[in-house]
Amino acid sequence: MPLARRSRQADNALIPLPGHDARGIIVDVPTNERFATAPPNPLQQVATAPVSTFSIDVDTASYTLTRSYLNGGHRPPAAAVRVEEFINYFDYAYPAPDTLETPFRTSVSVTETPWNAGTELIQIGIKGYTPPAADRPPLDLVFLIDTSGSMNAPNKLPLLRAAFRLLLTSLKPEDKVAIVTYAGSVGTALEPTAASERAKIIAALDNLSAGGGTAGAAGLQGAYTWAEQMARDGEEGRLSRVILATDGDFNVGISSDAALKDYISDRRDSGTYLSVLGFGRGNTNDALMQALAQIGYGHAAYIDTLAEAERVLVPQAGSALIPIANDVKIQVEFNPATVSEYRLIGYETRTLRREDFNNDRVDAGEIGAGHTVTALYEVTPVGSPAARLDPLRYAESETPAAADRSGELGFLRIRYKRPGETESQLIETPIEPGMAEIPASETRFAAAIAGFGEALRGSNYLEGWTIEDAAALAGANTGADPWGSRSEALRLMRLATTLGNPN
């Protein structure tokens, strides 16, 4: 690994890598970071809690934050690890629907759990429809850029500029871009400008400098004001999105998380979505980033390298920004005749109450065109010696007749709303033993990534399975790897084995 990377600035100065000093030596990153976290999902007994409900998630920030920790020579704190974001960082070979009339297709596979031979993994995969790029409607994008003093670091504002330049290369001439900045106050760095005027947009980006406080809430208000103006001035059918780029807290203005969430929720219904990009380390408010992106029907990602910026942003300029389903919820009812115990791996911050599933007023996740979503359950078959929970003394002695439906393991229900609609649609699928709708190499790689995340956060369910075991399983199942992200995951696993627990 080189000690530093060469700047693209005119002076060609060496810029140290994040987590390193100017000589390339690993240093501690001062941290005031807040993570969106919750206790790991408990093991549930089907006899008493047969139904599991959660909102889907396509965020990836936890994985890239962990990568930044590991590349800086540190194991991440357990609170930084959200296993579903590890799993969903990667695309999987799920079959896609043929038309937008069915916005996504569901696939299910049941395999042995690599860390516990007495249990099985149920993998649920969702693949969104991808319309031809030529059919993508024009975009109205507002870049909301944090220019506070804390952004004055090589892996913050300079990387942000380079990231947005990459996005510009993939925009269509009819797309429009506005740039709003916030520090101690809010300013408009660029009024709505056609993407064809690329030099003008790049000049506005290059003129940005860092200094002052962090009036983030006022910045959001300014960004949404421009988004609404662009919607009024433009033709019908354009897609509107604010892309917030920041390194951390909103410490001037509407500073409570609840007030910010309410503001985003109110504006979302006007048709403008919000995506959130994190840059740099030390001040990251991961908890707020995730909450705002979820409420804004967007994606939260952490950008630690220019390659990550390309992976996240370039597809956004194609069809990926087209929302195809909002408020997507998953509910699985397990069959007590075949499954004695289960646990949902990850999604702790997105669990819902059972009654929330049918309540169309309860918000959930959004799926964009071409997105994949993956969820894993570890289940214990009835009679397996791997069962951890004793049967209840006063439970019903006989299994209800309705539970015995030809040996089904469970029943999968998915609710979603089409963009602009308020009433949800329902998809239902029985989960059968031995289902194999997902290629075996894909299920094994997903299991390896899940085990990696579980090991990093100190899971009690791995039965002695280690990161080395995860690396061996991932290495044998990298499959197609166009971005090199699976090979990189293998490198991170090997790196993690050399590092001690976080301080």
Image (cartoon, rainbow, N blue to C red):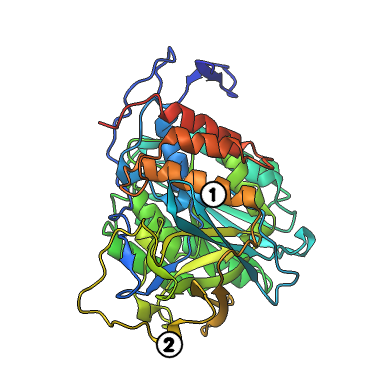
Residue drawn 36% across and 56% down?
A: 386
Q: Secondary structure at mark 1?
A: helix
The residue closer to the viewer here, 50 or 62, is: 50
Q: Is residue 402 above or below residue 176?
A: below
Q: Which label belongs to residue 184?
A: none
Q: Amino acid at mark 2?
A: Ala
Residue 243 lies left or right of residue 387; in this view the side is right
Q: Quadrant of the C terminus?
A: top left
Mark 1: amino acid: Ala
Element type at mark 2: helix
Q: Is residue 311 above or below residue 363?
A: above
Q: Position of residue 347 (x, y in %)?
A: 40, 59
| Residue at the extreme top of the image, as rendered | 23
Q: Which residue is tagged 1?
A: 446
In this figure, which residue is indicated by the disc labeled 2? 401
Q: Residue at x 36, y 40 (%)?
A: 464
Q: Pick whichever of labels 1 and 2 is earlier in the sequence.
A: 2
Percent x, y for residue 339? 42, 69
Along the viewing direction, whichever of 253 and 276 lies nearer the viewer: 276
- Residue 239 in view of the camera: yes
Q: Residue at x 34, y 49 (%)?
A: 461
Res 46 → quadrant: bottom left
Q: Residue 310: horizontal and vertical position, in percent? A: 62, 41
